[in-house]
Image (tube, grey):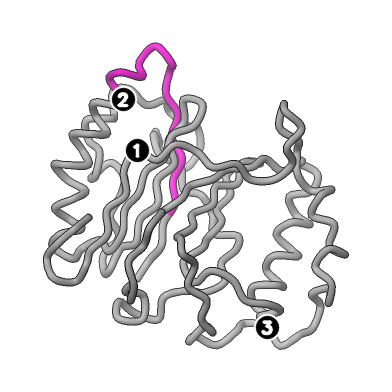
Amino acid sequence: MKRLMYRAAYESADEAYVMEAVTIGGAGQAMPLVDSGILMTVAIYRWNNQLFLYCECVQERIEPDELFPELAPWLKIWPGGGSDRRWVPMADVFHFNEPAGPEHWRRRAPVERRVGRIAHLKPEMIASYIYYHYQLQEERAFSGGKYEIIGIHENVLFGYQEFPQVVEEPVLPPKLHTKGTPPNWEDARMDLHFQPWPDGHLYFKPIESLFAYYNEGEGNAR
C-alpha cells in the first residue's frame, strides 16, 4: 500500500469551475476506484484557492490527474519536475504508523471525521522540524493516531487525521535504534518552528473538506 499527498492551486476567479470538476471527479473516478478496492481512502480538502489530496493506493499508484481529469484546465502549473505539473507531491515527513498491508490498514470501527489541516513552518526551521519528527517517528518515542500523517511542500504542512483516533503499536520495524528524541517533547520547541497565522494562532488549523471516501471492504464506499 502507498499513502500519497498532493497539493494544487487555482485562480480565485475559477473557483466555481474547480468545485464542479472536483464533484465530477469524485463521483466519476474517485468513488468507483474506492468501491472497487483500488483505493482504500481518498479525501480532498480546500484552503485559500489550494487543494490538498490524500490517497491510499492498495496496489498500483493512482495519479491525481487520473482522478480529476476535468480539473486540468483550471489548475496552475508548478515549475520543476521535468514536466508541467498541476499536482505537486507532498513528502511524508511524519507518521505514527504505516501500512503493512491492506488488512492491517483496514478500519475496524466507524470513522466519524476525516480531517485535513495545514500549518506553515518558518523556512529556516524546516530541517529542524524534519530532524525531530523523523527521530520521533522511528524511535517510537511515544504513540499517536494510527492513520495520522503529515506532508510537506515548500514550507506548507498538510496533515490528515481520523477521529476517533486509533492508537496501535506499529507492525513494521523501526529504522532507528537511537534515543535522540527529547524525553520531554516540549524541549524540542516546536513553538519556534511555526509561522504564526494572522490571528496569532501558531500551529495547525483545520481546512474545508470537499469529500472523503473509504472502502468498507464489502464493495461499499462512503
First in sequence: mark 1 vs mark 2: 2
As drawn, 160 above or below 2: above
Q: Is residue 113 left or right of residue 35?
A: right
The label nearer to you, 1 versus 3, is 1
Quadrant showing the C terminus: bottom left
Sequence order check, earlier mark of 2 and 3: 2
Residue at point 17%, 45% (across, down):
29
Q: Amino acid at mark 1?
A: Leu
Task: Kindly identify the amino acid type of the residue bearing the numbered disc 3.
Answer: Leu
Q: Is residue 219 left or right of residue 165?
A: left
> Visible in this render: residue 82?
no
Name the mark nearer the viewer: 2 or 3: 2
Q: Residues within 10 Å of mark 1 (few under 14, many from 20)?
A: some
Residue, disc 3:
176
Label 3, secondary structure: give it. Answer: loop
Identify the disc placed on residue 210: 1
The boundaries of the magenta stretch are: 5-17
Question: Mark 1 or mark 2, which is nearer to you?
Answer: 1
